[in-house]
Amino acid sequence: MNTNNPSSLCTDAINVLKQNDRGSYTIPASGLYPHQWLWDSCFIAIGMRHYDIKRAQAEILHLLTGQWHNGMIPHVIFADKKNFSPDHNIWRSWLSPDAPNRVATSGITQPPMIAEAVVKIGKKLPIHERRSWYKTVFNPLLRYHQWLYDERDPHNEGLTLQIHPWETGLDNTPPWMHELHQHLLPWWIRGLKSSRLLWIGELLRRDTKYVPATQRLETVDALAFFSIQRRLRRKIYNTDQILPRADFTIEDLVFNSIFIRANEHLAAISKTINQPLPKDFIERTNKTREALNSLWEPYSGQYYSRNFVTHELIKIPSIATLLPLYSGSIPKEQASKLVHLMNDSHFFGSKFPVPTVPLNSPWFKQHTYWQGPVWINTNWLIIDGLIRYGFTDEAKLIKNKSIELMQNSGFSEYFSPLDGSAAGANNFSWSAALAIDMLS
Ligand code: GLC
């Protein structure tokens, strides 16, 4: 695709979403991602609301059908069993008494973007319809946020912890991979590695049948992800059983920044429908805002995620450092420092911003998943944060460059920050949806 006409880009984007539409939910991309994913559907609904508000609402309502009895909203809701039973069987979430009765889902969550999508949809509705929309989703949303506090902030410290890299949505991002590599791999992965039999693991991978292996996770890391997931399954996704011996738990910067913003949206929803939030819940949300600033490291002038067990910051630079802008809860001085990093051509100031890993990092690879490429959803979150802090020129630049990327290389999953070339899946739903939003 190479179209310089914004209205035709918008039409193309709508066509991508229609192709990926499965009735009441949208898959991220055909082949590679055949189910419904939590934060994907939120970004998708944010784009869809511009041309079909009812369909955008349905996208969110379908996500809520996956809600667990304990309040968790899972990161994947599986498509019909007939076609994709291996995916269901890997998770076996039906083993948990908390799993929903009629829907097959994964057993972990993803960044809580739902409140953002709900409010963005609400803003398009006349006030009486907005109120009834908010009333429909308020209780499930509140239960989800309460679950995050109850199960994922066990010491009431303000920050929630994540138990699998998939929960951050930034799967192989360097801070998580650094932590992963600190731990001994299970014996069977070490065995495969030392006897040069990792190719057996490669045969089991579905992703590399659709995307070149160099643009995805290393096989050894994919197996390590699988092994963490198996442990969660053995503990039937019960946090009380998972946490005591979990050495791989992180208070993730991206997740918590999004959670802070989501709590702010939830408060706005509760005000609009006159249904007050519980007092102790409000206290916890205030604490989270304050706690985020404890992740600031003054010497390098960056924010970092924190290891939940050792309480040490994981000082590996990545795009996560910029996401507190989206939370809106950091001092202006820190925001200016982050903008400085964004403009630095050794750091995030690439030809096509914003790379998911700084250019001067030893981890940087221009086409490898979350280890360098530009993703449209992180750009969207950063643009929003920049506008909030008054950096409108910087926001405009990232928006224009994002649109240029999609005009030149299509609605790819991700792009090289150096030359804008496409990587990952084609016709990726959230790229298309956020193009519509950026153009509106
Ligand atoms: C990949 C991404 C994740 C996304 C999913 C579906 O796993 O890392 O963020 O939700 O694909 O698109």
Image (cartoon, rainbow, N blue to C red):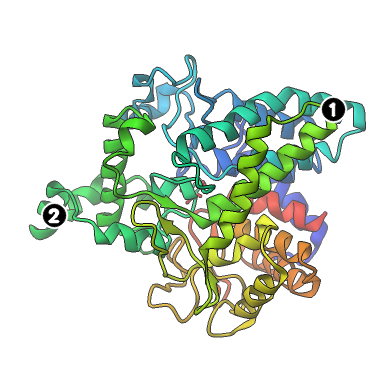
Disc ID at residue 131: 1
Position of the C terminus by quadrant: bottom right
Mark 2 burial class by Cα count in 10 Å: few <14, some 14-19, many 20+: some
Residue at left 58%, top 44%? 40
| First-in-chain label (1 vs 2) | 1
* 213 to the left or right of 197: right
Residue at left 50%, top 20%? 69
* Relative to 272, residue 11 above or below: below
Residue 142 spot, x, y in % from top left: 64, 30
Disc 1 from disc 2: Cα separation: 55 Å
Q: Name the foreground residue: 47 vs 345.
A: 345
Disc ID at residue 190: 2
Residue 276 spot, x, y in % from top left: 76, 29
* 316 to the left or right of 118: left
| Whether residue 156 is visible | yes
* Relative to 349, residue 438 above or below: above
Residue 190 spot, x, y in % from top left: 13, 54
Q: Name the foreground residue: 421 vs 232.
A: 232
At mark 1, the secondary structure is helix
Residue 247 spot, x, y in % from top left: 29, 49
Residue at left 92%, top 33%? 126
* 344 to the left or right of 439: left
Residue at left 26%, top 43%? 227
